[in-house]
């Protein structure tokens, strides 16, 4: 074969191969897409999008977004992400995210499960510190439960005494310095502690405080004293000689007799705390006369009660004086027995407030029966 024939044959072979390859490539490129075969999903996902619901079981039953054209998709404007596809996440949802997830999933599935919804947090609280939020919650709780808390806190002793206008007359003589009270406290210091405790128990009922009168050779009346003011009073009052009880007792009894007919007036309960017999000697009869006169000025023995507490147990003359006015007041001319006495043994066991309540209960029983 000649050289020209060989070259022509090679050229034809190359042309045939080129045509064959061109036909094969063209058939691949123009191959029609089967309408029944879905396009593969893109392999990327937006930061706010959820994985496909097919990839993992859904925590909330909902129709597939592919099979239901009415369902919103991840790219639907204004609808947000399909939260019922979050089963593929290992993240633990916060309260707000659980709320949003339950709400949106319920709308997509056609029903809302109110049992699974959490309260939506107030956006105004996000700018507050945990301390501020806890303080406000505690304040709201106290306001909502104030009546229940108040009822549980008030003791039966305070309830009994709350029916009366309670006053204190306290001995401020030099003998009150003696340290023979519980805890080796002085008589004056122990009376101060008991008076403060009484004022605190009565504070819910006596909004203006209680009246306290100190006496020795003179007397001073302190009206409407709070527990804090009573503490200061006992710390600053100087002790002095003499135990002139008739004058302060007459002053407080006259105060009641002049105001007992006013609207809203309560029965008067006067607690007298002393460690001995009144002095000078004429004070003994003067005190008896004051009590008899006051008893003859009232219509009902429940209107007025005077309770004597002897603090310290060494003054036998003081014990005799208290027994005399407690047992023989009516025999000496009084219309009613308005005096009660409480021994120091009982006082040191139960305290001033309970001792007053016990005396009132005894008085009510005797007055009615």
Image: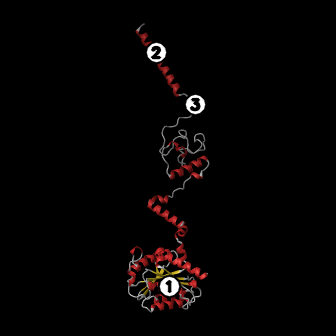
Marks 1 & 2, CB-CB < 8 Å contact: no
The residue that disc 3 covers is 34
Residue bearing the label numbered 1: 323
Q: Is residue 53 above or below residue 226?
A: above
The image's colouring method is secondary structure
Q: Could you say where residue 102 lies in the image, as x and y percent from the top left?
A: 56, 50
Q: Looking at the image, can residue 104 be seen? A: yes
Q: Quadrant of the C terminus?
A: bottom right
User: Residue 82: x percent and y percent?
Assistant: 54, 45
Q: Earlier in the sequence, mark 1 or mark 3?
A: 3
Distance Cα–Cα, label 1 vs label 2: 148 Å
Q: Secondary structure at mark 3?
A: loop
Residue 261 image position (x, y, % from top left) = 57, 87
Is 147 above or below relative to 319? above
The first of marks 3 and 2 along the sequence is 2
Q: Is residue 277 left or right of residue 34?
A: left
Give the camera-side residue of 129 and 69. 129
- Disc on res. 13: 2
Q: Secondary structure at mark 1?
A: helix
Q: Would you say the residues marked 1 and 3 are in contact, meaning their CB atoms lie under 8 Å apart?
A: no
Which residue shows up at 45% across the image and 92% down it? 282
In this rendering, position of residue 222 left or right of residue 164: left
Residue most extreme to the top: 1
Q: Indicate the quadrant containing the N terminus: top left, top right, bottom left or bottom right.
A: top left
Residue depth check, mark 1 versus mark 2: number of the one nearer the observer:
1
Q: Nearer the viewer, residue 114 or 145?
A: 145
Residue in view at x 43 percent, y 76 percent = 193
């Amino acid at each position: 074969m000649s050289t020209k024939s060989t070259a022509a044959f090679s050229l034809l072979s190359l042309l045939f191969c080129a045509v064959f390859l061109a036909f094969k490539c063209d058939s691949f490129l123009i191959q029609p897409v089967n309408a029944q075969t879905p396009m593969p999903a893109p392999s990327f996902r937006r930061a706010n999008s959820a994985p496909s619901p097919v990839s993992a079981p859904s925590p909330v039953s909902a129709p597939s977004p592919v099979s239901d054209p009415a369902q919103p998709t991840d790219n639907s404007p204004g609808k947000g992400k399909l939260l019922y596809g979050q089963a593929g996440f290992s993240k633990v949802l916060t309260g707000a995210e659980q709320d949003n997830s339950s709400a949106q999933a319920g709308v997509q599935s056609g029903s809302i499960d109110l049992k699974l919804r959490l309260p939506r947090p107030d956006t105004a609280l996000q700018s507050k510190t945990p301390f501020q939020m806890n303080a406000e919650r505690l304040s709201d709780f106290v306001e909502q439960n104030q009546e229940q808390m108040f009822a549980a806190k008030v003791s039966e002793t305070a309830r009994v005494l709350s029916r009366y206008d309670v006053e204190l007359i306290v001995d401020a003589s030099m003998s009150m310095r003696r340290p023979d009270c519980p805890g080796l406290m002085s008589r004056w210091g122990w009376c101060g502690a008991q008076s403060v405790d009484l004022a605190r128990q009565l504070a819910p009922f006596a909004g203006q405080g209680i009246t306290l009168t100190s006496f020795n050779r003179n007397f001073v009346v302190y009206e409407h004293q709070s527990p804090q003011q009573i503490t200061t009073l006992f710390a600053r009052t100087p002790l002095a000689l003499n135990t002139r009880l008739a004058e302060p007792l007459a002053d407080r009894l006259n105060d009641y007799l002049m105001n007992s007919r006013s609207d809203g007036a309560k029965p008067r309960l006067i607690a007298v705390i002393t460690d001995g017999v009144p002095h000078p000697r004429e004070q003994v009869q003067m005190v008896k006369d004051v009590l008899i006169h006051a008893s003859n000025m009232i219509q009902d023995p429940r209107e007025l009660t005077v309770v004597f507490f002897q603090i310290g147990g060494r003054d036998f003359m003081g014990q005799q004086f208290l027994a005399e006015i407690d047992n023989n007041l009516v025999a000496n001319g009084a219309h009613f027995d308005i005096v009660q006495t409480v021994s120091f043994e009982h006082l040191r066991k139960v305290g001033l407030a309970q001792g007053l309540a016990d005396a009132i209960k005894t008085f009510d029983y005797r007055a009615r029966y």
